[in-house]
Amino acid sequence: MRRSKENKPDGLRMNGVKMVKDMGRNQRRALSSINQNITGTSFHHLCMVNKREFPGKDALCNKKSVLEQRPNTRSLAAEMISNQQQFLEDNKNNQTKLTIKPGGLEDCVIIDVEEFGDDIDVMSPMFVKHTEAVLDETDGMASEFEMEDAEESIIDIDSSDSKDPLALVEYVDDIYAYYRETEVSSCVSPNYMDKQFDINEKMRAIHIDWLIEVHYKFELMDETLFLTINLIDRFLERCTVIRKKLQLVGMTAMLLACKYEEVSVPLVEDFVLISDKAYTRKDVLDMEKLMVNTLQFNLSVPTPYVFMRRFLKAAQSEKKLEFLSFFLIELCLVQYEMLKFQPSLLAAAAIYTAQCSLCRIKSWTKTSEWHTKYSEDQLLECSKLMVTYHQKAGSGKLTGVYRKYTSYKFVYAAKTEPAQFLLDL
């Protein structure tokens, strides 16, 4: 419907402020007729438009209030105002300067600059334009930071076990912090074989490879195997052993580990039988006494197994990754040179290497890094050694671990292609 002339509004209202349109060129006010009372000293701003309505004081005030709420852009806004003040001072001889009352942006005067010729550039409100640009830029940066934070966020791996009293969610972080502090005491010198005159690294490897097969045939818990190897190395570091007694040391260490970890412990006669009766029951019990006294009954040590359980949970593992990780770390149990790495590092490197083998790319999440306390660079040396052991696992004489993990029970984990690309890093 056409609006009648009587109902036609005499002005345009924007943001709650009524803006009066110019009625013609002859009705414009000259610069000399501007009320000088509006001049102030606290805030100077020049509002100049060419035959265009000013958007209103609220538009500027709203932008200014947004800036004040953003601490990252407040300094930029202050710098813009300072630059505009300098601009006005430099051009005060060429054009009239307009200022606003100290109370705020209460009056904005529309000035026609055509009367001043071509020497003066026509300006739209610089403060508004610059402010909008800064706000758009900061909004983009904020959204980018939020996306990065979302991508690199650390997952709460214990939230699903909050109602499980056996998970010890309230104490699990303290428990593993204690493990990290005490794992050094469970480590042995990587050069302790130098003190042995009748045994060497090769004999140790053959013996441990045999014990892994015994452990598998007895269907013992994983904890038992890792504690057995730890007891053997700690005992050999403190006592010299002749060659024909090395198997007795290994059998006795497994017997002690079973008493510590297992619910149903194998009999002493069972260990005598697997040694082809090379030792008697008395030999086993005498070695047991010697071993516990040498180690001062200290059997509560953090082995790689306790770290494997926690780190696999952080990696959100499935069966294939879990079995491949244990395959790699059991290969390391056989190798004497891997004694230079702490149990937590071995566990983290085994999981990292397994992930790389399955994904065919480097894979180490922020969650895994947070819980293991190891970065990819820290794991790389150990991981490269694991890859070489994986490549040679099916060849040679020491194939006990390989045969174990090529079975259906362990989803043929040993047949996974090694992560050879890690060797090139």
Image (tube, rainbow, N blue to C red):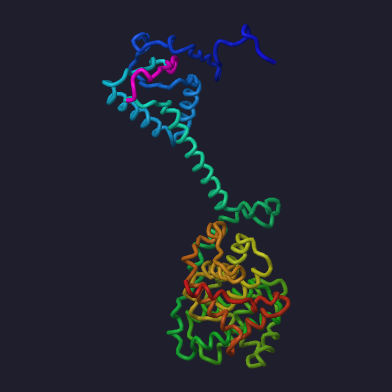
Q: Quadrant of residue 299?
A: bottom right
Counting labels gives 0
Q: Nearer the viewer, residue 78 or 207?
A: 78
Tell me residue 25's x, y (percent): 44, 13
The residue lying at 43 percent from left, 80 percent from top is 191
On-image quarter of the N terminus: top right
Using the image, determine if residue 356 lies above or below residue 12: below
Q: Nearer the viewer, residue 57 or 145?
A: 57
Q: Is residue 179 left or right of residue 416?
A: left
Q: Quadrant of residue 284?
A: bottom right
Expressed as whole percent of the image width and height from the top left, the position of residue 183 reads 51, 66
- Asked if residue 109 is among those painted magenta in the image, a careful observer would answer yes
Residue 41 locus on image (x, y percent): 33, 17
Q: Does residue 19 appear in the picture of this structure?
A: yes
**As drawn, is 223 to the left or to the right of 29?**
right
Identify the magenta region: 104-118
Q: Is residue 15 above or below residue 418?
A: above
Q: Nearer the viewer, residue 259 or 321?
A: 321
* x 45%, y 31%: residue: 131
Quarter holding residue 251: bottom right
Residue most extreme to the top? 6
Residue 72 in magenta stretch = no
Is residue 285 among what the camera can see?
no
**Residue 16 versus residue 374 in the image, above or below:** above
Where residue 29 sits in the image (x, y, percent)?
40, 10
Magenta stretch: dominant secondary structure:
loop
